[in-house]
């Protein structure tokens, strides 16, 4: 057992050291103002200029008024404007394709989730066919969400951000396109495999390994172009978002390969691996992609740099370190070595460090600027997502405590928590990012702004019902299961009203997604009034006009 | 790349090295060390490998996603009253010596099943319960699995395993016959029995050749 003890000791020492480094750097005032890297996302003289391609002319005018009313109109550097257009152009096809696919997966995933939710309180509904039984449609929902919607949206957003942040045209866009296609084929094949009963049996790792290979090759074809672009960068500083994306692109393949390697894992070791994977796919794949987007779009929309560059550095490294070791908290009370559980609980609590770092950074950037969410559709989604990131993370840390976990483990409370992270945080941020990006990709504005509002309020209202209902029900379910005098069937019966509430909330969310998807594809087919100009680089408050072809854009936007 | 990174600034090399070292550490802790510790662990006393039929049933348990509602990991009495519900003693790693893929589960929408074979040893009960859960457990929200059964009007043929449903749920003139997949699944469920006393993992166990 010397190995175990030394590993445990090393982790402990490292954690404490990390904490001291944090405190010491706080004391040295390292986390002060932004620095050059934080300004990387702006062109010269662009600070103070708001940007939200999803906003209407009126909203954009109000947004500028709210953020920086006295903003002087500089003549933008024509060279810089041309570079940004060229860079956006280099990724627009592959980004458009990836985001379109992600929206298709979102709709299918929502329907699968809704069917699964209904089946929990209507157990005799639609039981005749094997493929639609609860035990298949539920993992179909999870995998469509994780590898269909979330991964495709994240990849699309990353493919758009990387060239923009590096001011470098995307290298090998056609390989990325092929990669997106293979990934999609993998998700489709995996869905069919689960429906037919060919599941590997591990949560988050259900796809058979032969299908996983499609995702591995597809992911590599998407990842290499981004890393090659990084190595050819034309900027001096790497912006925060780049770290998160670049690291996520390194982490995910390792997780996915180790997790799916056939014949390697066994018994309880496999359970430990399962939750090493299950939590890291959130912590080291989705969270980095979501934070990368939030770190870019919040300052970009309001035209002000993030609060502190050094704080984001701390946030990044502590997230990587602590988040990667929390998986064992899924096995509290299970047949795994107790040191493993203890480490995971400790690191779960230590997650407060990166969460506070990100929270301070993103929320202090917003403080005093909250009126902006009234006018910017992008910001409305992303700021809410960033707030729910903080909420989900704090909840996660508390939930890992043994006393709390004893109640919540094995209940619907955990399901609600998972949705707070992947929906409340991640999906909200992705919605906002897609609203920002697509007008740039399509060179066409969102045709019907009311549909953006309808999408927002439906998913916010629906998710509130979903989350509050299920958390409440799950908590009481957990308390009842701990009471030896309550018969087990009573713990089932008492959850039913909450499961029904989940179906109501889920229906509203699904309806919101349908409106979003409809709007998305209406834009794709260039529905709606012809408002081309603003989608490029029109100035706030200036009436939009049809602009000349891309290459000739003069950059006269003031 | 004419770049001059600042003292605390990130560059590609720091990023790759830092990211991979951190992930390696986590992988060592949660994957490699458990592998080294558990790979030579002997099975619990009396635990037998699954038969071919039981393995087929286990595959059906996986295919139909039973794991999404049923855990297979009773907790210690000090933490939760699992044992008082008849779910058995707290399980230990040796109980899962033949369990690959693992099916520990994360939800208890239904009860824990690690010892269901000991708790409910009747094959008839399981077959009927899989066909019509609410005939046996009023209020249950488990779906029925009619696709694992064949409903026939005609007479019983030799070799048919007929499901004996409670009178209120049986339709006159109809017989419900379990298909081979249902029989395998029930055989697997009946094999779930980890009631033999657990060996505490002894430090000396490692010294054995």
Image (cartoon, rainbow, N blue to C red):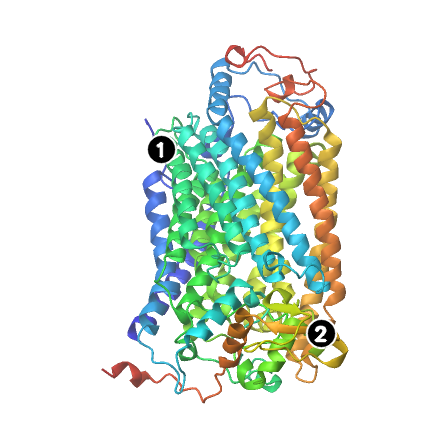
Q: Chain of mark 2?
A: B
In the image, A317: left or right of A546? left
Residue B14 against residue A195 in the figure, above or below: above
Q: Quadrant of the C terminus of chain B?
A: bottom left
Outermost residue toward the bottom in this view: B197
Q: Secondary structure at mark 2?
A: helix
| Label 1, residues with CA under 10 Å away: few <14, some 14-19, many ≥20 | few
Residue at image point 56% right, 26% down? A441
- Determine whether A227 is above or below B137 in the image: above
Instruction: Determine which residue is flagged by label 1.
Output: A228
| Residue plotted at (76% across, 65% down) | A497
Q: Could you tell me how many numbered marks the image carries? A: 2
Kindly identify which chain the residue marked by label 1 belongs to: A
Q: Position of residue A39 (x, y in %)?
A: 49, 30
Residue B157: x and y, percent? 59, 76
The one of A166 and A358 positioned closer to us in this rendering: A166
Q: Which residue is mark 2?
A: B134
From the viewer's perspective, tell me whether residue B201 is left or right of residue A457: left
Q: Is residue A352 visible?
A: yes
| Mark 2, other Cα within 10 Å: few <14 / some 14–19 / many ≥20 | some
Where in the figure is residue A524, as x and y percent of width and height? 62, 27
């Amino acid at each position: 057992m010397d190995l175990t003890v030394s590993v445990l000791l090393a982790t402990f020492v490292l954690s404490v050291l990390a904490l001291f480094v944090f405190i010491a750097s706080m004391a040295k005032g390292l986390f002060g103002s932004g620095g050059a890297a934080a300004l990387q996302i702006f062109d010269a003289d662009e600070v103070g200029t708001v940007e939200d391609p999803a906003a209407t002319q009126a909203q954009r005018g109000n947004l500028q008024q709210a953020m920086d009313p006295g903003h002087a109109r500089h003549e933008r550097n024509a060279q810089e404007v041309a570079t940004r257009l060229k860079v956006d152009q280099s990724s627009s096809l592959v980004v458009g394709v990836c985001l379109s696919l992600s929206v298709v997966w979102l709709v299918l995933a929502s329907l699968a989730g809704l069917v699964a939710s209904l089946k929990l309180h209507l157990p005799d509904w639609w039981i005749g066919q094997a493929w639609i039984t609860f035990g298949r449609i539920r993992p179909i929902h999870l995998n469509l969400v994780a590898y269909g919607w979330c991964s495709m949206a994240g990849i699309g957003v990353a493919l758009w951000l990387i060239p923009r942040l590096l001011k470098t045209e995307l290298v090998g866009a056609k390989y990325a396109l092929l990669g997106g296609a293979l990934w999609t084929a993998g998700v489709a094949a995996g869905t069919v495999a689960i429906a037919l009963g060919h599941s590997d049996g591990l949560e988050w790792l259900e796809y058979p390994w032969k299908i996983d290979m499609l995702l591995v090759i597809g992911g590599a074809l998407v990842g290499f172009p981004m890393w090659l672009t990084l190595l050819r960068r034309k900027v001096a500083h790497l912006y925060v978002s780049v770290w998160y994306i670049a690291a996520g692109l390194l982490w995910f393949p390792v997780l996915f390969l180790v997790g799916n390697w056939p014949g390697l894992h066994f018994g309880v070791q496999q359970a430990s691996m399962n939750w090493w994977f299950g939590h890291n796919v959130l912590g080291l794949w989705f969270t980095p992609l979501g934070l990368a987007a939030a770190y870019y779009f919040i300052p970009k929309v309001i035209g002000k740099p993030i609060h502190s560059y050094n704080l984001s550095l701390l946030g990044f490294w502590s997230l990587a370190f602590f988040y990667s070791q929390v998986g064992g908290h899924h096995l509290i009370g299970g047949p795994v070595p107790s040191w493993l559980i203890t480490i995971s609980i400790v690191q779960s609590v230590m997650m407060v460090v990166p969460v506070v770092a990100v929270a301070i950074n993103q929320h202090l950037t917003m403080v005093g600027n909250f009126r902006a969410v009234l006018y910017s559709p992008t910001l409305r989604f992303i700021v809410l997502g960033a707030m729910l990131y903080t909420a989900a993370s704090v909840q996660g840390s508390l939930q890992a405590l043994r006393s709390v976990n004893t109640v919540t483990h094995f209940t619907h409370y955990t399901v609600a928590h998972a949705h707070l992270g992947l929906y409340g945080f991640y999906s909200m941020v992705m919605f906002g990012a897609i609203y920002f990006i697509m007008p740039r990709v399509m060179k066409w504005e969102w045709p019907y702004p009311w549909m953006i509002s309808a999408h927002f309020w439906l998913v916010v209202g629906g998710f509130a019902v979903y989350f509050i209902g299920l958390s409440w029900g799950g908590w009481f379910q957990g308390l009842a299961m701990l009471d030896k005098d309550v018969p087990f069937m009573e713990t089932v019966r008492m959850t039913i009203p909450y499961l029904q509430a989940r179906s109501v909330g889920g229906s509203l969310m699904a309806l919101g997604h349908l409106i979003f998807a409809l709007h998305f594809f209406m834009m794709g087919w260039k529905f709606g009034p012809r408002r081309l100009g603003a989608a490029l680089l029109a100035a706030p408050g200036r009436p939009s006009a049809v602009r000349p072809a891309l290459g000739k854009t003069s950059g006269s936007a003031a | 790349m004419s770049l001059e990174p600042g003292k605390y600034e990130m560059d590609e090399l720091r990023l790759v090295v830092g990211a991979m070292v951190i992930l390696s550490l986590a992988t060592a802790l949660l994957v490699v060390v458990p592998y080294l510790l558990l790979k030579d662990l002997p099975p619990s006393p009396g635990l037998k490998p699954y038969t071919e039929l039981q393995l087929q049933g286990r595959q059906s348990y996986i295919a139909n996603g039973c794991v999404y509602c049923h855990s297979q990991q009773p907790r210690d009495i000090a933490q939760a009253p699992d044992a008082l519900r008849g779910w058995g003693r707290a399980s230990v790693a040796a109980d899962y010596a033949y369990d690959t893929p693992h099916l520990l589960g994360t939800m208890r929408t239904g009860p824990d099943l690690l010892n269901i074979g000991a708790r409910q040893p009747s094959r008839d009960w399981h077959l009927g319960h899989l066909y019509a859960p609410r005939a046996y457990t009023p209020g249950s929200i488990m779906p029925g699995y009619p696709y694992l059964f064949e409903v026939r009007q005609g007479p019983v043929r030799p070799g048919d395993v007929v499901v004996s449903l409670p009178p209120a749920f049986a339709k006159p003139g109809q017989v419900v016959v379990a298909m081979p997949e249902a029989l395998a699944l029930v055989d697997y469920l009946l094999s779930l029995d980890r009631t033999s006393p657990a060996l505490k993992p002894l430090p000396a166990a490692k010294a054995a050749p």
